[in-house]
Amino acid sequence: MSRTTTAVTVGLREQLRNYVLLALLVVLPIAFISVAFAVTQDTTMPVRTIVDGQTTTVPRPMPDVHGVIMTPITSTIIAGLVGLFLMQNAAVDQRLGLSGYRAREVIAARFGVLLVLTLVVTAVSVGVMVVDFVPENPVVFVAAMLLLSAIYGLVGMLVGALLDRLAGLWVMLILPMLDVGLFQDPLFVRDAPAWWMKLFPGYHPTRVLVDAGLTGEVDTLASMGWGLAYLLVVGTATIGIYYRTTRIAGRGGRP
Amino acid sequence: MPPAVRRHPTARAMTVRRLAAGVRLNVLTFVRTPLNVVLAVALPIVVIEGWGRSMAGLPETPTMEAIPLTLGRLLGAILGVAIVAGLLGLTQMISAREADRRLVQTGYEPRTLLATRLLALSGVTVAVAAVNFLVLAATTSPEAPVLTFAFLALAGIVYAFLGALVGAVLPRLFEGSLVVVFLAMMDAFLSGDSPLAADVPDFVTYFPLYHPKELLRAAMFEGTVATGDLAFVAGYVLVLLAAVTAVFGATMQVDGRWSA
C-alpha cells in the first residue's frame, strides 16, 4: 500500500468513526430535499433553458425545477464545508511532512478524502432527489452534480486557507445559497443572466443541471467544458495554497 | 495617620467585575478579526439585495402572488441576521469551551461565564442587526423604524442562542455548522413566506423565525406590534436560555471529575 493510499485510508477512517457526521450527511439531505419537494406548489413555471441550440422558455412543473436547484444547493453547501474544514486542519499535515511524506503525497491524500466525501454527498443528494423526480438525462445530470460539488469542495478549501473559521463558515453558507439558489435559479432569473453572475462557480454546471434535468436533449455540454476549466483553475490555486500551508518551515518541503 | 485599609470586593462586585471583563474580552476577540467585522457588514448588503431582487423576480401565476421587492428585502434581512448570528453563537461556544473549563476550575461560576458569552453574543448580534436595518432602511421605508430594528435584533438573538445551544450540545464546529446552516435554510424556506411553498405544515409556527418574521412584517408594513407573536418569541428566547444554561452547566462540571 502506498503512503498516499495509507493517508487517504486513515483520513476516511477518521470520518467514518464520526457517527454524528455520518448521520448528518445522510439525514440533512433527506430532510432538506424531501421537504422542498413536499411543500413546493404543484404548478407550471416558465423555465429559460437551451433547446436545440436555441435559448427558449419551456413550461415545467415547479417542484421539478425547484428540485433541480435544491439538490445541488444541498451538495454544494456540504462539499464546501468539507473542503473548508479539511483546509482548517491542514496544519496537522505538516506532521506528515516531518515524518517523511512528500508534499504531493500529502496533497493527493487530502484531495482523495475530499473526492470520496464529495462522491458520498452527491450520491446521497441525488438518491434523495430521484425518490420524487428523475432527471431527463440522469447521466449528464449526475456528472454536472459531481462537477459542481467538486468545484465547491475546492472553493471551500481555498476559503479555508484565506479566512478564519467564522468568516469561512459565513462565506461557505452564503456563497452557494446566493450562487446556485438565487443567481443561477431559472425560477428567479428569467432573462439573460448578468455578466457578473457568470463569474460564480455555479454558473456553468447549473446550466447543465437545468438542461439535463428538465429537457430531453443536452445542449449545454460546452458548459461542462467551461466548468471543468473552472475546476482546474480552482484546483491549481488550492494545490498552491495547500502546499504553502503544509510545507515544513525552513525546509520548503519536498515536492 | 493610620494606614488605608484595602477593602476586598464583595462577591457581588466581583461577579460584576468578572462579567464586565468577560464581555469586553469576548467582544474584543470578535472585533480584533477585522475580516469578521467587514463580512458582518458586507454580507447583509449582499443577502438583502440578492434575496429581495430574486424573490421579486418570480413571475405571478394564477396560484402564486408576486412578492414585492420590499417584502423580499425584509425576508433577506431576517435570513441574513439569522445566519450570521447563529454561526456566531455556535463558534463562540465551541471555540471557548476548553478555556471556559479552565476558568471554572479556577473558581469562575459557570453561570457567570455563560452570561459573559451570551451578553457579548447579544451585543454583537444587535450590531449586526443594526447593519441589516440600515441597509433595509436605505432601500425601504419601514412604518415603525425603531420596532423594525428591535424585532430584527430579536430574530438575531433567537438564532444566536440557538447556535449557542447547538454549540453546547454538539461541540464540533463542522457538525454544528451543518445543523445551524440547514435549520436556517429550512426555516427561511418554510416560515419565510416563500411564494414557492404551499401546504406548509402547521408545526412551522414553532420554527425559530416564524414569529419574529410576523413581528417584523407588522412593524415594517403596519407600524404595529403583534403582541401574541412578541410573547411567543419572548418565551422562545427564555426556553433557549434555560436549555443552553442547563447544557452549559452540565458540560462545565468539574467537581469530583478529572479535568478535561
Image (spheres, coloured by chain):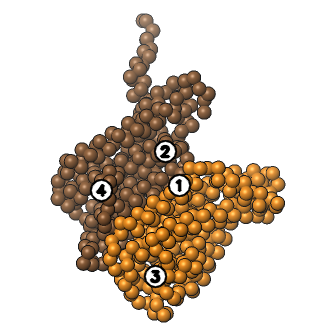
Chain colours: A orange, B brown
- Mark whose residue sits in front, 4 or 3: 4
Q: In what element is the residue under mark 3?
A: helix
Q: In what element is the residue under mark 2?
A: helix
> What amino acid is found at the position of numbered circle 4 in the picture?
Asp
Is B130 in front, or is B113? B113
Q: Is residue B55 left or right of residue A209?
A: left
Task: Residue B114: name its quadrant.
Answer: top left
Few, some or many residues within 10 Å of mark 4 (<14, 14–19, 20+): few
Label 1: which residue?
Answer: A24
Name the chain letter of the residue that bears numbered label 2.
Answer: B
> What amino acid is found at the position of numbered circle 2 in the picture?
Gly
Label 3: which residue?
Answer: A214
Name the chain letter of the residue that bears numbered label 4.
Answer: B
Which is more N-terminal, label 4 or label 2?
A: 2
**Residue B128, image x and y in percent?**
38, 53
Which is more N-terminal, label 3 or label 1?
A: 1
Q: CA distance from mark 1 to mark 3?
A: 29 Å
Label 2: which residue?
Answer: B167
Name the residue at 49% across, 76% down. Answer: A134
Res B202 label: 4
**Residue A205, image x and y in percent?**
53, 77
